[in-house]
Image (cartoon, coloured by chain):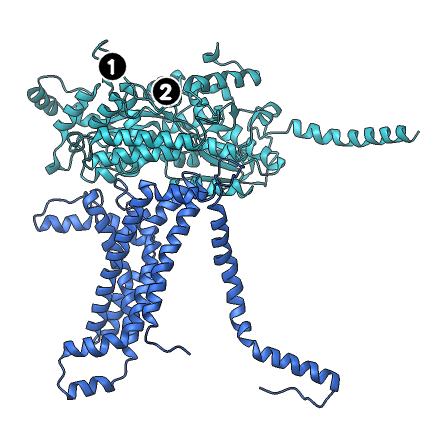
């Protein structure tokens, strides 16, 4: 960086030096400023606005908007459908995140042991994530169709009678979760595999020289070193699973009998079908708090033993 | 002197404005008879859904005819049916003019009217009636589909009434008839009562041949509630609300109907997956020949009769829906829901664009073009079409449609209705999943009371618009417009 010529003009010299020092001292703002402005406009402002809306009674059907305080939160927390969709979402998050994590992690471990055809296999494994969730939902809907679906055709070959997996309250939730796992395990796979590629070789070589078993190497070396990567993968999947909307909308539309309705779908319906904007805003604030809490816990765990800066 | 000048100036300004006022009072219309094309080269934006078969046929027939007659280009924004209301509501709430004409289901009109985005059509009609003929609908259909309480806001694009489609190749087959006679001790006929429906359904349910008795819609709260009411509930005397606006879903009749319609015995006579099937799937099962009978609505007629769309099109016939035999009178009761969408004009567009929108409605959905659609596709919802001897001879089901449109009961067009519909639909889905009908219907009824109370209908003096009131509104509107209507005499 070329410093300004301080001897040129006494008056201008002082000003340019001051400007230079100022820009140097605050240059980070120039880099984070644009992102911050966009964040404020499309994330922070809507959150603040939604919080405001949640304190009033706002509907599409009326122009009057009386202040109701926390009544919308109260009504949401006392609403059976909200509680049911919260339960469904937690079920979805727990099983979808753990399922996609195990499958993705397993695939990452396995692919490192393959020497031939690894690139092609990697490409094949990530195909699901390249598809739009709506397409995935429609595709699985057809495959699971009891009358003409591929899955039932295969089951028929095995002598198993046709199953109505998306129509039964007992199986629909599980099927939606399985489809979500199928679509999103490649994300975990890619993150973990990238993380594994950056691990240093030295600890592994030392462990092998000392005759440590593969399981112990995995437990004592691989897992601890991958912890930040694992947590990032889990965080991304958790947040993503929490806001699931499209796959469920296409596959079951929340049915049968509310068994697959996620919070996002329920809040969408509350706002845009039931005309209850402020109640949906209250529900979304509650959802945001839960996601925020879980994310904060994960971040805390992630940075527990890591020195930052 | 000064005040005289002011008066003269005002008179001058007023006289300048007069042509503008009179220009809004009357405006020219496209007329194929005279070749008038006042809007040639203009564009009209319509927000719509493509999922309803009859709309696709309208686009194939009416829109090209209008574009040719007018020189106007129609631009469609087609959406999934379930996404349409949110899209229209948000645009309306923002005062947007993204589209000129919107597809509005009767149950949505209340919410949109409250937002002030539905243009009242009286002034447009009085200025240029064209071929619109609002008196050419049954009072119930017009009051349900085209009006928001006492305001006239739309031209119906279809009126749905319940119907029963069945396969004549099965019902007229001598072997089937003999087998049925042997099994049930009576002649194989198109079912007229619920009991007959269950028997005939059982007879035709042969999973090994990929054939089932019938198919109803259970997939979404909206679908399940509709089939519950149209095909079963109304005939048993179930209604949405009483005169005091209390929901009627926990009555004995409502619970009995639920036990029949979503009972496991009845479900077993339908193709697997029935609990999740929506209108597309049940329609598809019939058109693929997988069911012997099918409870449908009049909007499906053109598709069911199209040989390119249905493998059983040539063997498809229609009948009134099976009803409930009243044990006291012995009569078969069969009442129907009358519902459907209308095309409505966005109140937030310019006056010039409103005139163009009206030009489209009066012609493309007017009396003559309706005849064109009925003649080619067998679908109609105007009285002149439904009673036309030539058309009735060609399409016999039009008479049954007409009768149904005279007595059909519309669903409430209130802003909170979708939420109430969801509550009762969910209960029915839970019964289908094995839940107890009495307790679930009672819970849903209580939920609806809360929803209605929450909307201020009990305490804030807002009243329910009954079917009879709707007819009164229609008659009053016809009188205002200087029209006579057969049902308003």
Chain letter of mark 1 equals: B
Chain shown cyan: that is B
- Location of residue A164 with respect to B158 vertically, above or below: below
In the rendered image, residue B2, in percent from the top left (x then y), is placed at: 91, 31
In the rendered image, residue A299, in percent from the top left (x then y), is placed at: 35, 67
The N terminus of chain A - image quarter:
bottom right
Picture residue at 22% right of the left edge, 79% below the top: A221
**B59 or A144: nearer the viewer:** A144
- Location of residue B198 with respect to B345 vertically, above or below: above
- Return the mark for residue B242: 2
Residue B80 visible: no
Picture residue at 54% right of the left edge, 68% below the top: A33
Query: In the shown orientation, is residue B33 left or right of residue A280?
Result: right
User: Would you identify the image quadrant in which residue A233 lies?
Assistant: bottom left
**A296 or B332: nearer the viewer:** A296
Residue lying at the far bottom of the rendered structure: A7
SS of the residue under disc 1: strand
Chain letter of mark 2 equals: B
Residue indicated by mark 1? B332
In the rendered image, residue A47, in percent from the top left (x then y), is placed at: 47, 54
**B386 or B219: nearer the viewer:** B219
- Location of residue B358 with respect to A153 vertically, above or below: above
The C terminus of chain A - image quarter:
bottom left
* Mark 2 neighbour density, 10 Å: few (under 14) some (14–19) many (20 or more): few
**A58 or B142: nearer the viewer:** A58
- Location of residue B137 with respect to B43 vertically, above or below: above
User: Would you identify the image quadrant in which residue B305 lies?
Assistant: top left
Picture residue at 70% right of the left edge, 85% below the top: A13
Say which colour chain A has. blue
């Amino acid at each position: 960086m070329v410093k300004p010529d301080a001897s040129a003009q006494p008056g201008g010299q002082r000003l340019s030096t001051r400007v230079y020092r100022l820009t140097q001292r605050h240059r980070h703002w120039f880099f984070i400023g644009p992102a911050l402005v966009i964040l404020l406009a499309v994330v922070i402002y809507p959150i603040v606005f939604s919080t405001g809306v949640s304190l009033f009674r706002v509907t599409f059907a009326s122009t009057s908007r009386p202040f109701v305080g926390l009544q919308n939160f109260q009504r949401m927390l006392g609403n059976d459908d909200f509680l049911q969709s919260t339960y469904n979402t937690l079920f979805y998050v727990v099983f979808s995140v753990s399922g996609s994590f195990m499958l993705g992690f397993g695939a990452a471990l396995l692919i490192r042991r393959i020497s031939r055809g690894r690139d092609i296999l990697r490409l094949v494994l990530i195909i699901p994530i390249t598809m739009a969730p709506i397409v995935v939902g429609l595709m699985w809907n057809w495959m699971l169709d009891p009358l003409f679906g591929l899955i039932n055709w295969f089951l028929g070959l095995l002598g198993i009678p046709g199953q109505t997996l998306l129509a039964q309250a007992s199986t629909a939730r599980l099927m939606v979760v399985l489809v979500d796992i199928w679509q999103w395990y490649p994300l975990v796979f890619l993150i973990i595999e990238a993380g594994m590629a950056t691990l240093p070789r030295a600890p592994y070589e030392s462990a092998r020289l000392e005759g440590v078993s593969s399981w112990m190497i995995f437990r004592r070396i691989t897992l601890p070193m991958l912890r930040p990567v694992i947590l990032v993968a889990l965080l991304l999947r958790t947040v993503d699973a929490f806001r699931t909307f499209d796959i469920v909308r296409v596959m079951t539309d929340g049915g049968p009998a509310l068994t697959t309705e996620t919070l996002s779908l329920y809040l969408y319906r509350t706002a845009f079908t039931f005309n209850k904007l402020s109640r949906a805003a209250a529900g979304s604030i509650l959802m945001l708090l839960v996601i925020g809490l879980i994310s904060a816990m994960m971040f805390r765990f992630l940075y527990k033993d890591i020195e930052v800066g | 002197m000064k005040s005289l000048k002011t008066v003269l100036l005002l008179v001058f300004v007023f006289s300048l404005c007069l042509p503008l006022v009179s220009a809004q009072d009357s405006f020219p219309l496209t007329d194929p008879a005279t070749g008038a094309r006042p809007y040639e080269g203009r564009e009209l934006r319509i927000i719509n859904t493509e999922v309803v078969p009859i709309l696709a046929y309208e686009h194939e027939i009416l829109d090209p005819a209008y574009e040719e007659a007018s020189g106007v280009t129609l631009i469609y924004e087609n959406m999934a049916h379930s996404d349409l209301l949110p899209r229209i509501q948000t645009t309306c709430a923002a005062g947007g003019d993204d589209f000129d004409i919107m597809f509005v289901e009767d149950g949505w009109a209340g919410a949109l009217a409250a937002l002030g985005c539905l243009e009242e059509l009286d002034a447009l009609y009085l200025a240029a009636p064209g071929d619109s003929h609002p008196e050419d609908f049954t009072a119930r259909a017009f009051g349900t589909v085209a009006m928001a309480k006492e305001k006239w806001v739309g031209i119906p694009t279809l009126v749905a009434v319940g119907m029963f489609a069945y396969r004549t190749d099965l019902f007229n087959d001598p072997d089937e008839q003999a087998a049925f006679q042997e099994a049930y001790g009576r002649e194989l006929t198109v079912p007229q009562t619920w009991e007959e429906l269950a028997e005939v359904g059982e007879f035709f349910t042969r999973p090994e041949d990929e054939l089932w008795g019938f198919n109803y819609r259970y997939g979404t709260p909206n679908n399940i509630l509709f089939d519950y009411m149209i095909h079963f509930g109304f005939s048993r005397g179930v209604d949405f609300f009483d005169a005091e606006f209390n929901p009627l879903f926990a009555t004995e009749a409502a619970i009995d109907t639920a036990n029949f319609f979503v009972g496991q015995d009845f479900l077993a006579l339908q193709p697997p997956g029935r609990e999740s099937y929506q209108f597309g799937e049940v329609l598809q099962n019939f058109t693929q020949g997988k069911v012997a009978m099918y409870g449908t609505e009049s909007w499906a007629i053109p598709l069911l009769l199209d040989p390119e769309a249905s493998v059983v099109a040539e063997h498809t016939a229609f009948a009134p829906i099976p009803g409930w035999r009243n044990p006291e009178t012995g009569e078969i009761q069969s009442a129907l829901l009358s519902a459907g969408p209308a095309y409505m004009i966005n109140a937030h567009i310019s006056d010039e664009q409103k005139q163009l929108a009206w030009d489209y409605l009066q012609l493309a959905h007017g009396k003559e073009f309706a005849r064109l659609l009925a003649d080619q596709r067998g679908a109609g919802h105007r009285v002149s079409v439904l009673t036309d001897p030539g058309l009735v001879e060609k399409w016999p089901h039009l008479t049954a449609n007409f009768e149904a449109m005279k007595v059909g009961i519309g669903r409430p067009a209130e802003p909170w209705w979708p939420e109430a519909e969801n509550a009762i639909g969910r209960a029915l889905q839970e019964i289908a999943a094995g839940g107890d009908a009495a307790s679930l219907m009672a819970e849903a009824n209580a939920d609806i009371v809360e929803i209605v109370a929450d909307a201020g209908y009990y305490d804030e003096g807002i009243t329910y618009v009954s079917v009879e009131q709707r007819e009164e509104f229609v008659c009053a509107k016809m009188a205002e417009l200087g029209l006579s209507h057969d049902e308003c005499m």
